[in-house]
């Protein structure tokens, strides 16, 4: 299997963006920087993918946007979680952890059989 080129598994983009906004409003570049730092460089969203996701999430009503001034004194759109966004984040995080745990169980169960092969 070829390594993924900094891509995310389906369904995780919205989750990680919502999580990035959990502690308060951020603009797009700040969200991108946060995800890259928290994942130690594994999660890198291209600008187009990030902003498409932000607009999609906003249409769902999980975030809202407001114009403001960034730390670089530039005009930027700041995104923040709505009440329904917090609920969505909580439910998606539970589901993602359940799924990840199941995948790890499958992988861990396969290891003893693999180690016995010569």
Image: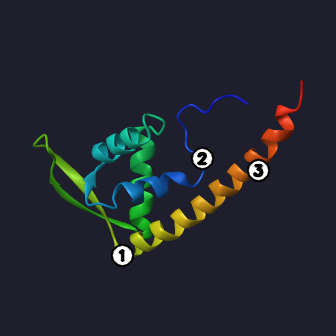
Within the image, what quadrant is residue 99 found in? bottom right
Tell me the distance, in whole angstroms, between the alpha carbons under discs 3 and 1. Answer: 35 Å
At mark 3, the secondary structure is helix
At mark 1, the secondary structure is helix
Tell me the distance, in whole angstroms, between the alpha carbons under discs 2 and 1. Answer: 26 Å
Tell me residue 45's x, y (percent).
Answer: 44, 40
Res. 83 mark:
1
Residue bearing mark 2: 9
Q: Residue at x 44, y 68 (%)?
A: 60
Q: Horizontally, is 54 left or right of 110 in the view?
A: left
Q: Residue at x 74, y 46 (%)?
A: 108
Verify CB contact (< 8 Å) between mark 2 and mark 1.
Answer: no
- Which is nearer the eye, 86 or 102? 102
- Which is nearer the eye, 83 or 52? 83
Q: Residues within 10 Å of mark 1 (few under 14, many from 20)?
A: few
Res. 106 mark:
3
Tell me residue 12's x, y (percent).
Answer: 54, 53
Q: Residue furthest left?
A: 73
Q: Is residue 106 visible?
A: yes
Q: Quadrant of the N terminus?
A: top right
Q: Horizontally, is 45 left or right of 76 in the view?
A: right
Res. 4 mark:
none
Q: Horizontally, is 28 left or right of 1 in the view?
A: left
Q: Quadrant of the C terminus?
A: top right
Within the image, what quadrant is residue 64 found in? bottom left
At mark 2, the secondary structure is loop
Q: Earlier in the sequence, mark 3 or mark 1?
A: 1
Vertical comparison of 30 with 65: above or below = above
Q: Horizontally, is 104 left or right of 112 in the view?
A: left
Q: Residues within 10 Å of mark 3 (few under 14, many from 20)?
A: few
């Amino acid at each position: 299997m070829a390594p993924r080129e900094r891509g995310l598994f389906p369904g995780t983009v919205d989750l990680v963006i919502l999580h990035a906004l959990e502690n308060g409003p951020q603009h797009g570049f700040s969200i991108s920087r946060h995800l890259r730092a928290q994942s130690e460089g594994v999660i890198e969203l291209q600008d187009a993918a990030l902003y498409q996701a932000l607009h999609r999430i906003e249409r769902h009503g999980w975030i809202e946007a407001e114009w403001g001034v960034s730390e670089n004194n530039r005009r930027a759109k700041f995104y923040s979680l709505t009440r329904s966004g917090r609920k969505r984040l909580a439910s998606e995080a539970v589901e993602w952890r359940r799924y990840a745990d199941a995948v790890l169980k499958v992988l861990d169960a396969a290891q003893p059989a693999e180690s016995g092969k010569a």
